[in-house]
Image: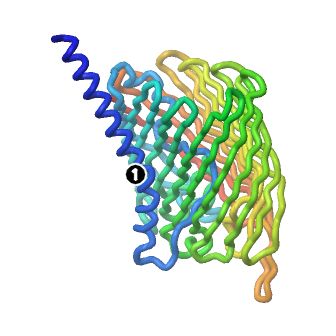
Amino acid sequence: MVQERRRQSQSWQSHWQDVVLVAALALVAATPTLRAQEQTAGKETLPVATETTETENPDKEVAPDAGTGNFTRSPFHISVSVREGYDDNVYTTDKDKVGSFFTNGQVVIDYKFGNDRTRLDLQGWGGATYYYHRPFGQEYDIDTGVTFSVTHQATPRLGLGAAAYLTYRSEPDFNTGIGINRRSGNYFYTNDKFSVTYQWSPRFATATSYTLGVIDYDNSAISTYEDRFEHTFGNEFRYLALPTTTLVGEYRYQIVDYDTAPNDSMTHFALAGLDHSFNPHFNISLRGGVQFRDFENFDEQTSPYGEATLNYSLGERTTLSWANRYGLDEPDVPGTASRTTFRTGLNATYAFTPRIVGSLSFFYQHDDNDSLLTPTSFVPAFDEDSLDISLGVRYEINRNWAALAGYSHTEVFSDITLREYARNRYYLGVNASF
């Protein structure tokens, strides 16, 4: 009798997980389309996206949560944070800076489950920051979003995967390097990747993918030159040269479709590289090659292209993720065709003690913006550097409560003085996790 009840319970749990998986896959497939349709209705301009593999949101509660709320077997984890702080440049301007105290509230919900064939990770967050002294414009900032990933081994040879990052926010996102590097109103951004892998032999496999990117600014003046769709099709040829090393040859084809700006383009990527695991806690991925971009309204461009990522973890004490990219990028200046960008980003956490966890985020981007000469105007070429650094400390009071403190510094250096600014933010807060 007891065994029969156990079989029924296991059957019910398996059925419930299958239902959740199907619903989650439907959400990933449908959300970008529905969101784009909502933004298209009643607007003259539509969004567009960009290409990036980074999908983490740097402003929400992440690795510092280690050790809190993980004592239960429930797949759900809820984190609620309240912060009080000060921002010395709420408008991200070079002159006539305005500072203000602020209150920030945020809720993060995590859900995870997995078995031998299927793994699902889902995180949603919602938050807002209210400024007590912001003379014009909206008095609050929004930060909401969802990240989602699922992998399913359909057969011993065939694997399916999907990963999505959707956000609607007010602050610039230095983690992805997408959009404007200063406050420019609320905007929607998504980057969603769907992939199929097939193991043709013990050493040879292929990975085929499609990535959708969309970016859409509420500010109509920004929308005219930023809003776009990006479609990237890719295929990797993977050969296991050593038990820890896989050689990779890759081709990508990208279509960029702007709503208004005359910057539509098609880009071919020819890449080679490797994936290597030094040990189960330390791995790197390298890609290098060339990209050929064909514009609809400008001359063709060719540029070297490279990507490098490094991931390291040592239990729950230390984690480190470092991503780098060099190549042609979409411009954030009206009237120019493109820019050449080097971007590097580092996220790290370190547990000084079982109760005290420190975090560091470092993002740097260098842009070489193209010049443009038309019969009616001239846009000069210029260089620009963006820097964003965040430090945080978390003190675990008990298994559910923690105290928070943090500081961030953002600075933009540009050949065009009016584009420069510096900004500092400080905060103290409390977090509850369940």
Figure quadrant of the C terminus: top left
Q: Residue furthest left?
A: 1
Tell me which residue sits at (35%, 36%) in the image.
18
Q: Residue at x 48, y 69 (%)?
A: 218
Counting from the top left corner in percent of width and height, residue 277 is at: 70, 24
Q: Estimate the x, y position of residue 288 in percent, counting from the top left.
A: 80, 45
The x, y position of residue 244, in whole percent, is: 72, 23
Q: Residue 42: image x %, image y %?
A: 41, 77
Q: Is residue 51 visible?
A: yes
Residue beneath the point at 53% across and 16% down: 353
Answer with left or right where residue 58 lies relative to residue 285: left
Q: Residue at x 52, y 67 (%)?
A: 217
The residue to which callout 1 is attached is 128
305 vs 131, left or right, is: right
- The image quadrant where one finds the N terminus is top left
Picture quadrant where residue 2 is located: top left
Of 249 and 126, the residue lying toward us: 249
Neighbour tally class for label 1: few under 14, some 14-19, many 20 plus, Cα within 10 Å: some
Near-viewer residue (41 or 87): 41
Q: Is residue 57 above or below residue 399?
A: below
Side of 43 where 212 appears, left or right: right
SS for callout 1: strand
Figure coloring: rainbow
Outermost residue, bottom direction?
375
Give the camera-side residue of 367 and 110.
110
Instruction: Decide if residue 163 is on the left or right side of residue 416.
Output: left
